[in-house]
Image (cartoon, rainbow, N blue to C red):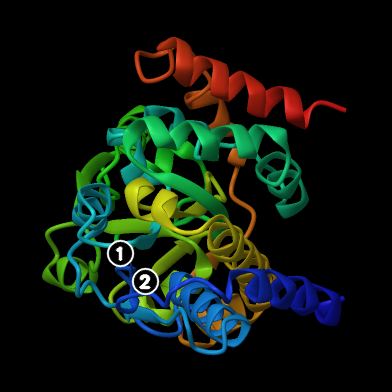
């Protein structure tokens, strides 16, 4: 299979070869450090594109927040100051509120469900809709299912979250979600280790890979596997730059990003169990089977809130729900 994929990419590269070389490297920004989920995707993409074009198209990876936080990265892509980015879905909801459908709480129960929706017509519809907001949506990579950590108490049911001050992404949806769950959300850009260590917040929520790779176990005591949201990464490009590419190069960039995202999702899922084991060994107290139903019931009315009543947002959520039906 890998041989067939590379052959297809190489064929596209040969079609694009007659065109003039890119004036400089493609600037691709992420907020996370090397080895993190977003960086795995970008590294895969850079390697595939370099190989397929024999070095004609190269990628400059701006990692660890070198291009700013995720909100700033999105704005720079829109302005053409960056060509590409891989950004968590949450910050997109300010500029493309229909992206909230991806992170609707308790929508996905498994990775296979997430793949069915995001790799199918509903996911392609969302990516296409981003152009109105100033982006070309190329692919969905993955952060994973988000879980809750804190320094106050084990969270076994929704009542245990009441009063916790939790760092959340700079996202209206995430802020509203944790308000409904009884916590006090504190929107704050990445990174957050210093914020947690300062004691200004009690906890945060993230996938297991993030919790381990950033060693949040050193500043957090309790972990609850709430899996309240499936968190995707959106791989996006500046439309003016992308449309100015020769058609064959556009296909090549899109295909390399798609393959990079697929490989990253596979690797991310392989690491989940290992991260949980490492966090336990590091001393985190883990609630493996919290009462997720109590959380789900508390936020069941979210779809009728002002965050989802806009026609485009409501239609996107319904498209995702339809795709999940047998």
Q: Position of residue 118 (x, y in %)?
A: 65, 44
Image coords of residue 41 (percent x, y):
52, 72
**Residue beneath disc 2:** 221
Residues at marks 2 and 1 touching, judged by CB atoms closer than 8 Å: yes
Q: Is residue 271 left or right of residue 72?
A: right
Q: Which residue is mark 1?
A: 151
Q: Quadrant of the C terminus?
A: top right
Label 2 and label 1: CA atoms lie apart by 5 Å
Q: Secondary structure at mark 1?
A: loop
- What x and y, as percent, mark residue 86? 41, 61
Left or right, 238 with respect to 7, comes to left
Q: Where does the image place residue 189, in percent across and percent down from the top left? A: 21, 57
- SS of the residue under disc 2: loop
Q: Is residue 182 visible?
A: no
Residue found at x 27% / y 77%:
64
Pick whichever of labels 2 and 1 is earlier in the sequence.
Answer: 1
| Residue at point 72%, 49% (across, down) | 115
């Amino acid at each position: 299979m890998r041989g067939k994929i590379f052959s297809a990419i190489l064929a596209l590269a040969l079609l694009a070869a007659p065109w003039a070389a890119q004036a400089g490297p493609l600037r691709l920004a992420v907020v996370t450090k090397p080895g993190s989920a977003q960086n795995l995707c970008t590294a895969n993409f850079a390697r595939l594109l370099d190989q397929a074009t024999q070095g004609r198209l190269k990628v400059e990876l701006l990692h660890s927040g070198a291009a700013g936080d995720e909100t700033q990265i999105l704005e720079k892509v829109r302005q053409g100051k960056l060509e590409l980015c891989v950004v968590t879905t949450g910050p997109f909801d300010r500029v493309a509120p229909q992206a909230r459908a991806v992170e609707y709480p308790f929508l996905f129960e498994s990775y296979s469900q997430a793949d069915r929706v995001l790799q199918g017509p509903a996911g392609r519809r969302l990516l296409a809709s981003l152009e109105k907001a100033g982006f070309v949506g190329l692919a969905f990579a993955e952060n994973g299912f988000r879980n809750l950590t804190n320094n106050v108490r084990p969270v076994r049911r929704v009542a245990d979250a009441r009063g916790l001050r939790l760092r959340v992404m700079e996202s209206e949806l995430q802020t509203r979600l944790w308000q409904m769950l009884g916590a006090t959300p504190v929107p704050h850009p990445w990174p957050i280790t210093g914020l947690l260590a300062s004691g200004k917040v009690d906890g945060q929520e993230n996938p297991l890979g993030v919790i381990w790779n950033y060693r949040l176990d050193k500043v957090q005591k309790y972990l609850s596997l709430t899996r309240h949201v499936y968190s995707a990464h959106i791989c996006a490009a500046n439309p003016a730059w992308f449309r100015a590419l020769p058609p064959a190069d556009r296909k090549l960039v899109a295909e390399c990003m798609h393959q990079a995202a697929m490989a990253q999702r596979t690797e991310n899922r392989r690491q989940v169990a290992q991260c949980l084991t490492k966090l336990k060994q590091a001393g985190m107290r883990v609630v493996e089977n919290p009462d997720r139903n109590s959380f789900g019931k508390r936020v069941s009315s979210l779809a009728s809130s002002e965050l989802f009543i806009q026609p485009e947002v409501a239609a996107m959520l319904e498209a995702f729900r339809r795709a999940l039906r047998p």
